[in-house]
Image: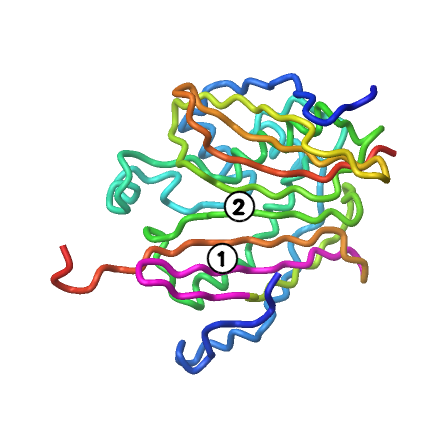
């Protein structure tokens, strides 16, 4: 497939995040920070409820990029994510992206982001991807 | 990435900010990869997920403990991975984590940690994590 600067990627909608998923993710990732699991703790920290691990949102973006640029044909060399807005259980994130730049060596710079069901940007990322 | 600390070790008492924490987590197993893939509802199954290396953040949590960070005030602001080579099931990672920056602002401390994830002597992934730590308000500050 030939890519062009400004070309948008087919979005990837993830199912609504559940509290059970946060527990599952804590087990799978080893991140047991109580702010993601303990309602009282999260409220003491000033949030209305537990918050979603930022790294779970980043995992969604990485999954999105892996789906659009599979390892068989591409090599993700760098992925940088900024966590812009807190995500809560029940939120539904859609991963979107576009080709920001094509370098002279053929590598792609991809801008990607997650947007919640309220249209808010929750994370934004940049990835360097090299075709094999 | 700036390598200079903006806060000297003596300001943090006995915490040696120049130290590197080295940990040897368990070998990468297919079960751990599958568990991670399921938890992230991954749609793509041909490879180890790119953020699987988040399993190797234990050194970061050890640093947060050494710095006595209250998790109620902790926010993960940025995460960057530089992939030098693919990880494989069966690899035995070694993770070396150090502080590369610590900046104090009026209401926030910004902490940046750098981890090298090695297999054998080869660096496979370099991780840079930036935390924002909300500083407690001074007494009487509404």
User: Left of B15 or right of it: where is B85?
Assistant: right
From this view, report whether residue A49 is shown above or below residue B1.
Answer: above
Q: Main secondary structure of the magenta part?
A: strand
Please report the bounds of the magenta region as a residue range: B101-120
Tally of marks? 2
**A23 drawn magenta:** no
Q: How crowded is mark 1: few (under 14 residues within 10 Å), some or many (20 or more)?
A: some
- Tag of residue A30: 2
**Rendering colour mode:** rainbow
In the depicted view, which residue is nearer to us: B39 or A106? A106
Q: Which residue is drawn at 55% across and 30% down?
A: A113
Marks 2/1: CA–CA distance: 10 Å
**B107 drawn magenta:** yes
Q: How crowded is mark 2: few (under 14 residues within 10 Å), some or many (20 or more)?
A: some
**Residue B51 placement (x, y as % from top left):** 63, 40
Quarter of the image where the N terminus of chain B is located: bottom right
């Amino acid at each position: 497939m030939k890519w062009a600067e400004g070309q948008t990627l087919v979005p990837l909608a993830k199912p609504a995040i559940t509290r059970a998923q946060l527990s599952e993710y804590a087990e799978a990732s080893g991140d047991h920070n109580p702010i993601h699991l303990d309602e009282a703790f999260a409220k003491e920290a000033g949030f209305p409820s537990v918050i979603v691990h930022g790294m779970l949102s980043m995992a969604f973006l990485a999954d999105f990029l892996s789906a659009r640029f599979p390892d068989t044909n591409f090599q993700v060399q760098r992925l940088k994510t900024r966590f812009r807005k807190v995500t809560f259980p029940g939120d539904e994130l859609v991963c979107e992206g576009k080709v920001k730049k094509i370098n002279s060596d053929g590598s792609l710079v991809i801008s990607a982001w997650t947007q919640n069901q309220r249209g808010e940007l929750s994370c934004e990322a940049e990835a360097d991807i090299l075709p094999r | 990435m700036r390598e200079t600390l903006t806060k000297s070790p003596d300001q943090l008492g006995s915490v040696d900010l120049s130290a590197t924490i080295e940990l040897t987590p368990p070998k990468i197993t297919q079960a751990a990869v599958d568990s991670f893939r399921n938890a992230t509802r991954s749609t793509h199954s041909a490879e180890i997920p790119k953020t699987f290396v988040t399993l190797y953040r234990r050194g970061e949590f050890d640093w947060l403990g050494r710095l006595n960070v209250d998790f109620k005030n902790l926010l993960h602001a940025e995460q960057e991975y530089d992939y030098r080579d693919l990880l494989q099931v069966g690899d035995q990672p070694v993770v070396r984590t150090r502080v590369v920056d610590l900046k104090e602002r009026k209401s926030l401390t910004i902490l940046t940690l750098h981890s090298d994830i090695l297999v054998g002597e080869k660096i496979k992934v370099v991780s840079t994590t930036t935390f924002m730590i909300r500083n407690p308000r001074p007494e009487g500050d509404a």
